[in-house]
């Protein structure tokens, strides 16, 4: 019940494409859903986050779509660039408790 | 703002020795700090949660006597890997939480530990 399931494991898109990464959860106590971007050898960096009372949030080229009834959320990257090539993690957190991470998606954007 | 640093960024040590990793919040006070380890091409695994001035809470399966965590101040937490073995080689990442109504945690750049 504490898991966050993330798919796909890896993704290759052409420059300008819109990669979509999906996550699903079971624990309805989760009330904060961040996405992190991680480059090799670096720590994760927060990209964008959403609370369950909102169905969509956009920040620059990154958009989170959230479906509370289905307990699913996804990340869309608009106009993807080679510099977006990285590993992306979805996560979920309940109140002040620990953050649960998805398994990660390795994205490669072809030039 | 909200910068977290780690030192060292990488370390190589011999089997049987101990190594200490520091995690500092540079421009904010962190009521809670988290320590993660990450194996190649895998996700972050939470090792322990530490609150300033109190004992760390370890996740199931993490040896508290092997991975000593000290959170002596609101800006510094340390992880000491005692009697390190090659299987402890990993990427260790800390994060810091401001507390209060903030949900966000800020991650450090990570420390690559190699035990030979």
Image (cartoon, helix red, strand yellow):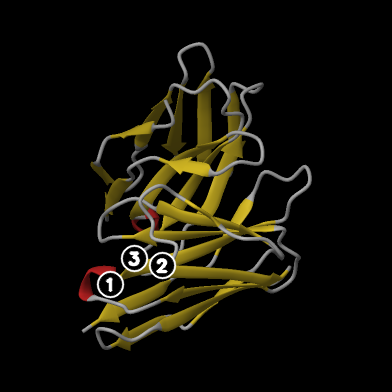
Which label sits in the foreground, 2 or 3?
Answer: 2
Q: Which SS class for mark 3?
A: loop
Give the percent coordinates (x, y) of residue B100. Answer: 78, 46
Q: Are marks 3 and 1 on the same chain?
A: no
Q: Nearer the viewer, residue B115 or A85?
A: B115
Spatial CA span between label 3 and label 1: 16 Å
Which residue is under mark 1? B89
Label number found at residue A40:
3
Give the percent coordinates (x, y) of residue A103. Answer: 32, 43
Spatial CA span between label 2 and label 3: 13 Å
Residue A99 showing in the rendered view: yes
Locate residue A30: give its quadrant: top right
Lateral position of residue A25 relative to residue B114, left or right: right
Which residue is under mark 2? B92
Q: Residue furthest front?
A: B65
Q: Are marks 3 and 1 in contact (CB under 8 Å)?
A: no
């Amino acid at each position: 019940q504490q898991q966050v399931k993330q798919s796909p494991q890896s993704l290759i898109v052409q420059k300008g494409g819109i990669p979509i990464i999906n996550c699903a959860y079971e624990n309805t106590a989760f009330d904060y859903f961040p996405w992190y971007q991680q480059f090799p050898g670096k720590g994760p960096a927060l990209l964008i986050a959403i609370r369950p009372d909102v169905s969509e949030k956009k920040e620059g080229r990154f958009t989170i779509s959230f479906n509370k009834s289905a307990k699913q959320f996804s990340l869309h990257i608009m106009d993807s660039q080679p510099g977006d090539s990285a590993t992306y993690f979805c996560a979920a957190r309940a109140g002040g408790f620990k953050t649960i991470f998805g398994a990660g998606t390795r994205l490669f954007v072809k030039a | 703002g909200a910068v977290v640093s780690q030192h060292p960024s990488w370390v190589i040590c011999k089997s049987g020795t101990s190594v200490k990793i520091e995690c500092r919040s540079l421009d904010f006070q962190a009521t809670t700090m988290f320590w993660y380890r990450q194996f190649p091409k895998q996700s972050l695994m939470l090792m322990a949660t530490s609150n300033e001035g109190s004992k760390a809470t370890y996740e199931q399966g993490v040896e508290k006597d092997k991975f000593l965590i000290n959170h002596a101040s609101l800006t510094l937490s340390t992880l000491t890997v005692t009697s390190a073995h090659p299987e402890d080689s990993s990427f260790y990442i800390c994060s810091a939480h401001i507390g209060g109504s903030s949900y966000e945690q800020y991650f450090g750049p990570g420390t690559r530990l190699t035990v030979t």
